[in-house]
Image (cartoon, rainbow, N blue to C red):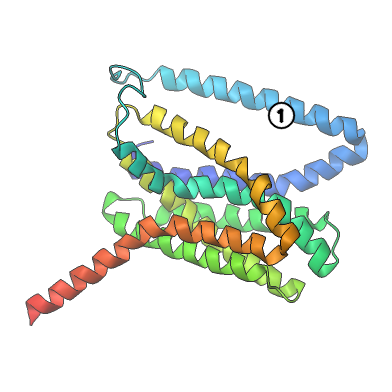
Amino acid sequence: SNPENRSRRTGYFNAAFALGFIAGPALGGITLAHLGVLGMFWSAAAMSVVGLAGILASYRLYSAIPRPQPKGGFLANFKLRYLAYLALFSPSLLRRLLLFALQVVLPLLLLDAFGITSEYAGYVFSFAGGLSVILMPVAGRLYSAREHSDHARRLVGMSLIAMALSLGLIGFSANFEAFLVLFAIETVAFSLMLPAATRLFGDAVEGEPHRVQILGFFSSLRELATLAIPLTLVPLYQYHPPLAWLGMSILCLAASLPFLRSFARSSSVVRLSAETTE
């Protein structure tokens, strides 16, 4: 999308992604009740075919758009500055890691800490999806212009810190009500953060001739990083459950660091303006 509409459209895109958290548990329950366990697998296979058809159709539409073709392959033209884009891509990486991590530890927390059966984890995800569907389109409209980039960076940085604090405290929740409040705070912060972060990454790679390859390369890294979740998070939870939540908190803090530079730059500008005035 063009830069003017990128933030708004990424908000809609991510909201559509969150719809899965609302529709998934309901459709899964209906499918299981009427078609049984085997029907669940056949339904998943049908959705995979529809998804593959959508990918192929999107690729044809994208290929039909005339654009200059870069010379040489992606690896042959790899630049060190591409690694700097990884910092801007880290919120998208974090989205996948947190989603997979929460699917692992959230049912365990509900059962072990609160005595709630794991089926209620689906309702919690539906609750989070509902908040995201409402907030992400709104967040996508907040900073739609390039001149708002510093504001968008600050929003991403502060939202990631709020996510880190809420996730860390969830591991020490004394009751289900406290957990719900903290999880709602994390969901709101996530919903405000992701559209702005996606737009910042899109703006950064806008002029790159290999931007599609850059995105594909980082997406591959994201899939590989996801494999580390069961290898690290499950042992942490088995050793001491709050450590798993602290691990997710640390990931959010690490992702926030590149975006917090905007605060340092803003403080320097304010300080310099004050000194000039004096």
Q: Is residue 168 left or right of residue 151?
A: right
Question: Where residue 189 appears, x then y in whole percent?
Answer: 52, 62
Name the residue nearer the viewer: 16 or 233.
233
- Secondary structure under tag 1 reads helix
Q: Quadrant of the N terminus?
A: top left
> How many numbered callouts?
1
For the residue marked with disc 1, what is the amino acid? Answer: Met
Query: Mark 1 = which residue?
Result: 47
In the depicted view, which residue is nearer to us: 194 or 118? 118
Q: Which residue is rendered at x = 82% and y = 64% of the image?
A: 112
State the residue at coordinates (72%, 64%): 240
Note whether 145 is above or below 245 in the view shown. above
Q: Give me the residue at 40% from left, 27% from top.
A: 213
Q: Which percent across, then down, holds residue 147?
A: 26, 54
Residue 125 in the image: x percent, y percent?
70, 54
Q: Residues within 10 Å of mark 1 (few under 14, many from 20)?
A: few
Q: Nearer the viewer, residue 168 or 273?
A: 168
Instruction: Using the rendered image of the protein, determine whether residue 123 is visible from the camera's viewpoint.
Output: no
Q: Quadrant of the C terminus?
A: bottom left
Note whether residue 211 is visible: yes
Residue under the point 25% across and 67% down: 266
> Is residue 119 toward the left or the right of residue 268 in the image?
right
Considering every residue shown, the one lying at the far bottom of the view is: 278
Identify whether 159 is placed above or below 176. Answer: above
Rendered position, 4 above or below 253? above
